Image: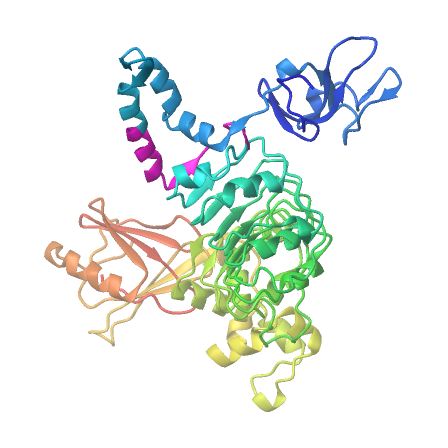
């Protein structure tokens, strides 16, 4: 090999212009003369062949157009870690010393450099202060001189080494093991060769809590092989690694709290059983993993599974989830509080996306966040009551009954609606009047009934008005005469301006409402399925109506 080409060139990662590649061959390529490097590009569109040239197979590629031959002077073999740090943070001490050697003192035959020496001390002290280091895309390929990192940067806690030229796990540990207090390490987008046996693992990162290995080509078997070197690991990111098969971790990853397997096409949901007993796992990210079903076979509906005992947050966005049975199973998890499930076929099963949200809330009793949106008590109550009403007729047809002695819904209904019996205990069994079938969609059937009552005058006949909206009934309890300026309601109702703010304050105490400054006349209309806007005497009110309890308000 020439002096410009490393002796271990085959297997090295290189950068050529802006493209990354792995060296697969070094040698001659007749009939040309000189040294050639056969490389496999990360981007196969950059190549020309699969390592075969004029009938001779010099090397092999995964892609038929992934290979090329280049001259060594076109290849950037990278730099050591500390050079990258100094370049990134403007702390290249050697260059500063060279610029200042003209200010030197000659003693006898020796030249003593004075000015540069001060620069070295100052900049070394700056390296000592570095805690969080990012050398992303800095062409880091190796550690450099032994123990130099630990002497120069003893206070490092976090290193971002993503998208560099690190060829193997050995080169990674040459760097990481010099950082005694390393807590976070990002190695994403490095095509790393991982160990094939435990004998190759000689370094333990005893304080490492966060490790990112996204797009590194690692397999789950390699994760388990390296895992003894991460005894305190809490967060592990493994996105986009083509992991398809999982194995049960034995005596490793027992401290893990977060696991990201997104963009790995798992064979099926049963693979999750193999990681279900990680004792401290709180967050599991499974976006775009191809899963469509999940099942916890150790318990039936209404019971809590021993699998994923501490799991609080589950992300299953961008998958193939279509059946409500998937959501039903999640209610078996003991601690689940947050669910992300956007961009699944299930989300399109109802005409109104809000209906899907309400169904999920009703089916998972302990859920507090859905798709990053908090579930407040009023929303949960409304969702559960809607659910109880929506499937009340099915419950009766399946054998449900208001009489506890006769209430025996069949197994098919209980499998489809595992929480329904619990909701009946919570709110009471649905009454016959609640379960009337919805009338055909014509305008007169879609009018909302607004009833105005005056508690101070119980003998006064309530006033009712029909307004466009859904089948919801809102009752406004009036404690003083009221005049609706827009002409919807006749006298003697009248509201004096000084009382307006107090009235709205009372309304806020009894309803889900927001008080804003607005116009000077009353406007009452629907802007969505559950939203009402009211503007009166300079105050603007937005009220969320509910179909199951009276909206108590004083106007």
Residue at image position (41%, 37%) is: 133
Whole-percent x and y of residue 222?
67, 50
Q: Which residue is painted at 54% across and 53% down in the image?
A: 204
Instruction: Please give the range of residues in magenta.
Output: 121-141
Q: Colour scheme of this structure image?
A: rainbow
Between residues 482 and 9, which one lies in front from this camera angle?
A: 9
139 part of magenta stretch = yes
Look at the image and tell me in which quarter the C terminus lies.
bottom left
Q: Residue furthest top?
A: 32
Q: Is residue 149 magenta?
A: no
Q: Position of residue 255 (x, y in %)?
A: 52, 62
**Quadrant holding the N terminus:** top right
375 w.r.t. 60: above or below = below
Q: Residue furthest bottom?
A: 405
Query: As rendered, which of 258 and 211 lies closer to the eye?
Result: 211
Residue 162 in percent (x, y) is at 53, 36
Q: Does residue 20 show up?
A: yes
The answer to which of 410 and 252 lies nearer the viewer is 252
Q: Is residue 245 left or right of residue 275?
A: right
**Percent x, y of residue 96:** 34, 19
Q: Residue at x 57, y 88 (%)?
A: 404
Residue at far right of view: 55
Residue 492 shows in the view? no
Q: Say if 512 sits above or below 289 in the image.
A: below
Residue 176 relative to residue 321: left or right? left
């Amino acid at each position: 090999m020439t002096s410009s080409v490393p002796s271990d060139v085959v297997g090295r990662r290189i950068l050529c212009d802006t493209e990354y590649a792995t060296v697969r061959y070094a040698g001659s390529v007749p009939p040309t003369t000189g040294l050639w490097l056969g490389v496999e590009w990360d981007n196969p569109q950059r190549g020309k062949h699969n390592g075969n040239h004029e009938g001779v197979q010099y090397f092999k590629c995964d892609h038929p157009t992934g290979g090329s031959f280049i001259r060594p002077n076109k290849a950037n073999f990278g730099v050591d870690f500390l050079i990258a740090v100094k370049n990134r943070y403007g702390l290249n001490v050697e260059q500063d010393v060279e610029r200042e050697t003209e200010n030197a003192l000659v003693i006898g035959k020796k030249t003593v450099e004075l000015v540069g020496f001060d620069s070295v001390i100052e900049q070394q002290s700056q390296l000592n202060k570095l805690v969080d280091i990012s050398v992303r895309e800095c062409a880091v390929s190796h550690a450099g001189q032994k123990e130099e990192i630990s002497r120069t940067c003893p206070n490092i806690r976090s290193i971002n080494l993503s998208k560099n030229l690190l060829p193997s796990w050995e080169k990674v540990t040459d760097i990481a093991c010099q950082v005694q207090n390393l807590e976070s390490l990002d190695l994403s987008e490095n095509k790393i060769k991982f160990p094939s046996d435990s004998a190759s693992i000689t370094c333990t990162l005893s304080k490492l809590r966060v490790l990112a290995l996204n797009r590194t080509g690692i397999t789950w078997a390699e994760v388990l092989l390296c895992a003894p070197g991460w005894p305190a690991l809490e967060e592990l990111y493994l996105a986009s690694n083509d992991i398809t098969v999982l194995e049960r971790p034995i005596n490793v990853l027992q401290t893990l709290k977060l696991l990201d397997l997104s963009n790995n096409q798992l064979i099926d949901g049963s693979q999750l059983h193999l990681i279900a007993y990680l004792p401290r796992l709180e967050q599991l990210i499974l976006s775009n993993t191809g899963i469509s079903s999940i099942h916890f076979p150790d318990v039936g509906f209404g019971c809590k599974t021993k699998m994923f005992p501490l799991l609080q947050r589950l992300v299953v966005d961008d998958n193939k989830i279509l059946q409500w049975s998937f959501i039903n199973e999640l209610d078996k998890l003991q601690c689940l509080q947050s669910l992300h499930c956007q961009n699944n076929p299930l989300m399109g099963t109802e005409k109104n996306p809000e209906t899907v949200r309400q169904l999920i809330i009703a089916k998972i009793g302990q859920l507090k966040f859905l798709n990053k949106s908090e579930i407040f008590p009023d929303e949960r109550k409304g969702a559960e009551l809607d659910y109880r009403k929506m499937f009340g007729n099915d419950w009766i047809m399946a054998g449900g009954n208001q009489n506890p002695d006769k209430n025996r819904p069949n197994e098919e209904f209980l499998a489809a609606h595992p929480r329904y019996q619990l909701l009946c205990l919570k709110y009471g069994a649905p009454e016959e009047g609640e379960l009337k079938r919805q009338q055909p969609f014509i305008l007169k059937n879609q009018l909302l009934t607004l009833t105005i009552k005056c508690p101070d005058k119980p003998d006064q006949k309530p006033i009712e008005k029909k307004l466009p909206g859904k089948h919801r009934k809102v009752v406004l309890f009036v404690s003083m005469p009221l005049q609706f300026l827009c002409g919807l309601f006749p006298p003697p109702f009248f509201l004096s301006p000084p009382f307006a703010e107090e009235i709205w304050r009372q309304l806020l105490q009894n309803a889900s409402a927001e008080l804003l400054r607005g116009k000077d006349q009353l406007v009452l209309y629907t802007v969505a399925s559950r939203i009402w806007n009211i503007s009166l005497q300079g105050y603007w009110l937005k009220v969320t109506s509910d179909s199951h309890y009276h909206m108590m308000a004083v106007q």
